[in-house]
């Protein structure tokens, strides 16, 4: 479901008035749109889709730190679009991509895209992993997400193979416990 300007604007207004739940919803909705926006722009210029996730996080952080500058009497999505476009241009400058290949888009491009398939679970996974100690987080990433063998993960981390196995096991158990207690978000 695509979030409308009125819905997003209302959520942002409520969040600025201190409604934490509305703020979580607006960030969730924006992350879907931003992910689709960045994926399509990066795909057009042959860039890695993993860059899209970094851009989504950078943009959400910029929105968070600059939310006090949003004028509630003005449309919300153009404000977000300006931040998103700036972040894309800034990213491409830093990675030395050709700016001539970045098309100028209109507001309908942003509003018409919502790539939430798998995005919510990836976001929840990142939140769960962030709650783990670094040792467990790396072990799980290497073995379960990157598909490395236990021996390869041990070599990369400088940990023993048994320590990798224990970290993966304990980390997954902690994540399962967090999910069952409703702390994934």
Image (tube, rainbow, N blue to C red):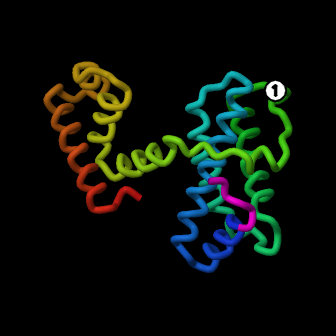
Q: Position of residue 70 (x, y in %)?
A: 74, 68
Up-down: is 71 above or below 86? Answer: below
Up-down: is 77 above or below 139? Answer: below
Q: Position of residue 170 (x, y in %)?
A: 19, 44
Taking depth in this image into account, of 91 and 13 the one nearest to the observer is 13
Is residue 48 covered in magenta?
no
Taking depth in this image into account, of 180 and 157 the one nearest to the observer is 180
Up-down: is 8 above or below 147? Answer: below
Give neighbour class at mark 1: few <14, some 14-19, many 20+ (Cα, 10 Å): few
Is residue 5 covered in magenta?
yes
Q: Which residue lies furthest to the bottom in this view?
A: 17
Magenta stretch: helix, strand or loop mostly: loop
First to last magenta residue range:
1-6
Q: Residue furthest left?
A: 162
Q: Position of residue 106 (x, y in %)?
A: 85, 45
Left or right, residue 184 beside residue 167:
right
Q: Where is residue 136 in the image (x, y as percent from the top left)?
A: 27, 41
Residue 154 falls in image quadrant = top left
Question: Which residue does the numbered mark 1 point to in the structure image?
Answer: 101
| The C terminus - image quarter | bottom left
Left or right, residue 6 beside residue 183:
right
Q: How many labels does the image show?
A: 1
Q: Residue at x 61, y 37 (%)?
A: 52
Residue 165 falls in image quadrant = top left
Left or right, residue 99 beside residue 24:
right
Q: Residue at x 41, y 51 (%)?
A: 127
Q: Residue at x 73, y 26 (%)?
A: 44
**Label 1's element?**
helix
Q: Which residue is drawn at 64% across and 70% down?
A: 11
Residue 6 falls in image quadrant = bottom right
């Amino acid at each position: 479901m695509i979030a409308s300007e009125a819905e997003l604007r209302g959520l942002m207004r409520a969040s600025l008035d201190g409604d934490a739940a509305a703020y979580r919803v607006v960030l969730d909705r924006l992350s879907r749109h931003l992910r689709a926006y960045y994926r399509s722009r990066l795909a057009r210029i042959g860039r890695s889709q993993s860059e899209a996730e970094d851009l989504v996080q950078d943009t959400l952080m910029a929105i968070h730190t600059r939310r006090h500058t949003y004028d509630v009497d003005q449309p919300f999505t153009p404000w977000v679009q300006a931040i998103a476009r700036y972040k894309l241009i800034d990213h491409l400058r830093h990675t030395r991509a050709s700016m001539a290949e970045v098309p100028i888009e209109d507001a309908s491009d942003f509003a018409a895209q919502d790539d939430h398939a798998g995005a919510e679970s990836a976001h929840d996974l990142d939140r769960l992993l962030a709650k783990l100690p670094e040792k467990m987080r790396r072990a799980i990433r290497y073995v379960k997400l990157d598909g490395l063998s236990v021996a390869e993960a041990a070599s990369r981390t400088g940990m023993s193979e048994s320590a990798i196995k224990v970290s993966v096991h304990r980390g997954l158990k902690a994540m399962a416990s967090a999910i069952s207690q409703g702390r994934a978000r």
